[in-house]
Amino acid sequence: MEEPGVVSRMFTGLVRLGVTAAYAVVLVAVAGTLWVLGPQVQKSVIAHMSTNLYNLQRGHLGTLVGSAFVTDGGPIYVWLPGLVCLLALAEWLWRGRRLVMAFALGHVGATVIVAVWLAVATYVGWLPKSVTLASDVGVSYGAAGVLGALTAAIPPRLRPAWIGWWLAVGVLIAAPGQDFTAIGHALALTLGVLLATRFHAATRWTPTQLALLAVSVVFGYLMLAGSSPLTAPIVGVAGALIALTAQWIARRWGRRRIHEPVAVQIQPPTITNANLPRTARETRSSARDLVLAGLAVGGNEQLAVDGLQVVHREPVVSVAA
């Protein structure tokens, strides 16, 4: 009786993670087909789909999409589980549309920026011309973009440490400037972090999501660390500490400015002759004159004294000569 429920939950999960499942199936199908056709065909396909400067300069813009489905990073069964966990977590948090957006920004954006860098570097002689023919295919740029976009799902109090860790690792691997793939990883990661400012995700993690995050972090670290697996953790921790320190200083500075007393300059009132109060004798004299004038004029007269209306209803009094 429990089996239909398990199958139903699995089917619901596959439907919810449709983009991740479909992409994994296509990657397995392409890798299996190339393995069956042999190394010569595989080498030819990689050269044709590579986003190297040679292909891009000749207008082969289709490589910007096709290169994400062709891999040359070793046996697919080694790295595919980590990639699936990363993409599944992102799709679980944001749905398929935003997953595609983050992956495409990392893959295409980093590829274009790296191509511009290679064009400049080879023109001025920083890099040899042979680098324009190097193969550049795979999922790593897109995966780095998704990893950076996960910043939106990290709790706010941990977000600076997360950003500091990954950006420090990215800068470390890209600093030498000779490996354009490392530069692409750092760029894709940075683009993903910037895209995270447009994403919103719940910060309450379920155990399954935490497990996917742990696998994704390990996968991302192994993908980015490259030839610096021992130095990268030290640099990453340093970056996280610097980010946390900067956050602490910013908070203290903000609180200081909020509680700082504001000096208000009080201007003394300007006193003119028109504002001076009249003496009591002048006030009584004016009131007496007004009453007498009203008696002389007649009854039912409304007299205004200092803004107040005084109604006189006495009969007319004759004043003898």
Image: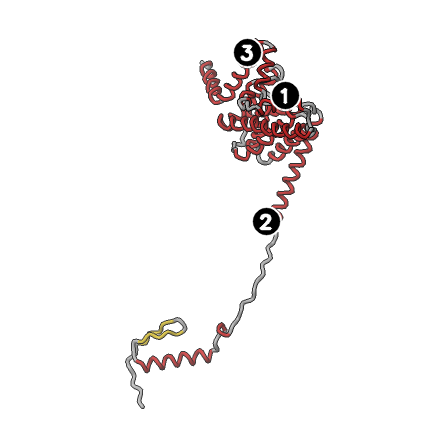
Q: Quadrant of residue 139?
A: top right
Q: Which residue is the site of mark 3?
A: 33
Q: Which residue is the site of mark 1?
A: 133
Marks 2 and 1, Cα distance to the nearest angstrom? 58 Å
The reply to whether the C-beta atoms of the residues labelled 3 and 2 are less than 8 Å apart is no
Tag 2: Cα neighbours inside 10 Å, few (<14), some, or many (≥20)? few
Q: Is residue 265 visible?
A: yes
Residue 296 position in % (x across, y down): 32, 82
Q: Secondary structure at mark 1?
A: helix
Q: Residue at x 59, y 36 (%)?
A: 157
For the residue pair 98 and 295, the one nearer the viewer reads as: 98
**Of labels 3 and 1, the one closer to you:** 1
Indicate which disc residue 258 carries.
2
**Amino acid type at mark 1:** Leu
Q: In terms of sequence position, does the residue under pointer 2 or pointer 1 come before the other?
A: 1
Q: Is residue 14 left or right of residue 305?
A: right
State the residue lying farthest toward the bottom: 321
Marks 3 and 2, Cα distance to the nearest angstrom? 64 Å
